Amino acid sequence: MTERDLKKEILTQEILANISALTRFAYSLCQHREEAEELVGETVLKAFEKRHQLKDDAKIKQWLFRILNNVFISNYRKNKKQRKIDLPANIDGSFSLFEQVASSNYTDEGTPEKSFINKITKEKIHQAINELPEEFRITLVLCDVDEFSYTEIAAITQVPIGTVRSRIARARNLLQKKLWTYAEELGITASSKEKEHVCTCGEEVLKSTNILTI
Amino acid sequence: MKKKNKQVASINCEQAIARFNDYMDNYLKGKTREELIKHIAECKDCMERFEFEQLLKSKVHQFGQMDDNAVKEKIEKLIASL
C-alpha cells in the first residue's frame, strides 16, 4: 500500500467512524435532514480534495468538522432565511431549571429535580436544541453531543475560546428555559413566590433586549 | 427556592455555580478547580444542583445522537466512487 493509499484509508475510516457526529452537526446547522446529508457528502468530497493539507492524523475529526462548518458557511448559509430573534442582553445565570423545579408543585419520591430530568423525552430535548439560535445550538451540540473541548470548538467555529464559553453558558441557560416551558405543559408550576420572580426577570428582559440575526 | 449563598472552602455558592460549566466541560484547572471540588464536597445544595446540571448534560448527549445507517451507506458509496 502506497502512502497515498494509506492516507485515503485512514481518512475513510475516520469519516465512517464519525458519520453520526458529522450528520448531527450538519443537522444542527441546516435544520433540514436532506440538506444535512448533502452537506456531509460535500464535506467528504472536500476532505478528500484537501487531504494533502492534513498534517496531524490525531486531529482528523476536528479537521472534518471545521471543513463541514466552512462548507456550510460558503454554500448553505446564504440560502437560509434570515430571521431575527430577540434575546436578553444578559441571561447568564439568570435562570435555573433546578431552582424552578425545586420550588415548584412537582413532588416525587427521592429527588424531584432529578426525577423531572428523567421525564424529559428525547423529542423535547431535540425540539429545545433545535429552537436555539444557530451560534448557541451548534456550540452546545459540539460540546455536549460530540464532546469536543472548548479549544477544539474554537478551532472548528473559528471564534475565541471566551466566545465559546459564553455561548455554552447562554445555550444551557436558554435550553433550561425551554425545558421549563415543557414542565409547565405537564402541569408543573412555579410557587407563587417564584412566579413573582419570573415576572420581575421578564420585565428586565423587556427593558434590555439585543436583536441577534441568525 | 432561593438557596443561601454560603462561604464554603474559600468560595461561596454563587462563585461555585459560576464555575459549573467549565468544570463539567473539563476546562477548569488548578486552584479554581480544587476550590470548586472542595466546595461541592462540603455544600449539599451545590452538590445537588451540580448533579442536576450533569444529569441534564448527559441527557443532551444521549438524546442528541442521530440514526446514521442511511447516511453511512450513502457516504460509503460516495467514497468508493472516488
Image: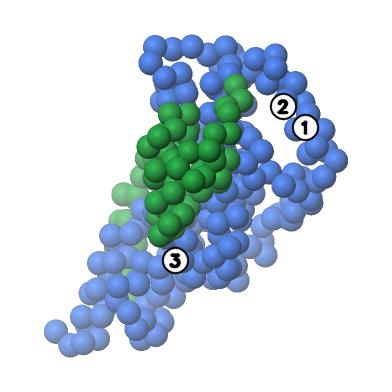
Q: CA distance from mark 3 to mark 1?
A: 35 Å
Q: Quadrant of residue B37?
A: top left
Q: Nearer the viewer, residue B28 or A75?
A: B28
Q: Nearer the viewer, residue A46 or B4?
A: B4
Asked if A152 appears above or below A118 in the picture, the reply is: below
Q: Quadrant of residue A194?
A: top right
Mark 3 secondary-structure assignment: helix
Q: Which mark is residue A152?
A: 3
Residue that badge 1 annotates: A202
Sequence-wise, the earlier of marks 2 and 3 is 3
Q: Residue at x 79, y 50 (%)?
A: A210
Left or right: where A10 falls relative to B54: left
Q: Chain of mark 3?
A: A
Q: Are marks 2 and 3 in contact (CB under 8 Å)?
A: no
Residue that badge 2 annotates: A198
Q: Chain of mark 1?
A: A
Q: Residues within 10 Å of mark 3 (few under 14, many from 20)?
A: many
Q: Colour of chain A?
A: blue
Sequence-wise, the earlier of marks 3 and 1 is 3
Q: Residue at x 55, y 51 (%)?
A: A168
Q: Position of residue B18 (x, y in %)?
A: 55, 46
Left or right: where A105 falls relative to B76: right
